[in-house]
Amino acid sequence: MNDFPLAPLRLTAAQAGFRAREQLGDLTGLKAHTIAAIHPVPEGWRIAVDVVERSAVPDAQDLMATFEVHLSPDGELQSYSRKRRFLRKDIHIGEES
């Protein structure tokens, strides 16, 4: 149970994830690989997006990054920041963002 009031959300989690991928890509020029997490927060949505920062051959050597994206309740980008970088081969099953 949450100890804080949530803003009225105007988007579903799926819609918020799509908007985060789209807006982050527009601003950074990076292609989203996956949505790692979506959480409703008092200000709207907090979404972790994994992106490919640099492609490599083999792809296990791709440089990946996780960005935390904050959206308003209606899906407008409020802020984003890179939280970590890693090689694709270093992704661990069961790891949380």
Image: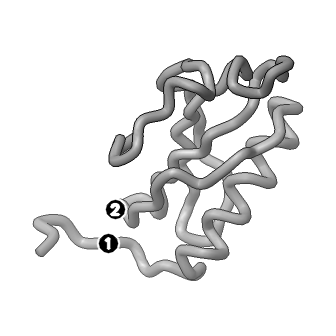
The residue at the point 72 percent across, 46 percent down is 33
Going by the numbered disc 2, the residue's amino acid type is Pro
Q: Gap between marks 2 and 1, in whole Å? A: 4 Å
Q: State left or right for residue 86 relative to residue 93.
A: right
Which label was assigned to residue 19? none
> Up-down: is 10 above or below 52?
below
Of 20 and 54, the residue lying toward us: 54
Residue 29: % across, % down:
88, 32
Mark 2 residue element: loop
The residue at the point 67 percent across, 54 percent down is 20
Which label was assigned to residue 42? 2
Instruction: Tell me whether the residue at label 2 lies in contact with that at label 1, contact meaning CB atoms closer than 8 angstroms.
Output: yes
Q: State left or right for residue 11 relative to residue 5.
A: right
The residue at the point 73 percent across, 52 percent down is 21
Residue 16: % across, % down:
62, 67
Q: Which residue is mark 1?
A: 6
Q: Where the N terminus falls, by quadrant?
A: bottom left
Label 2 CA crowd tier, 10 Å (few <14, some 14–19, many 20+)? some
Label 1 CA crowd tier, 10 Å (few <14, some 14–19, many 20+)? some
> Up-down: is 67 above or below 74?
above
Q: State left or right for residue 29 relative to residue 60.
A: right
Quadrant of the rendered structure where residue 82 is? top right
Of 9 and 37, the residue lying toward us: 37
Residue 23: % across, % down:
78, 49
The residue at the point 80 percent across, 54 percent down is 22
Of 10 and 54, the residue lying toward us: 54
Q: Where the C terminus falls, by quadrant?
A: top left
Going by the numbered disc 1, the residue's amino acid type is Leu
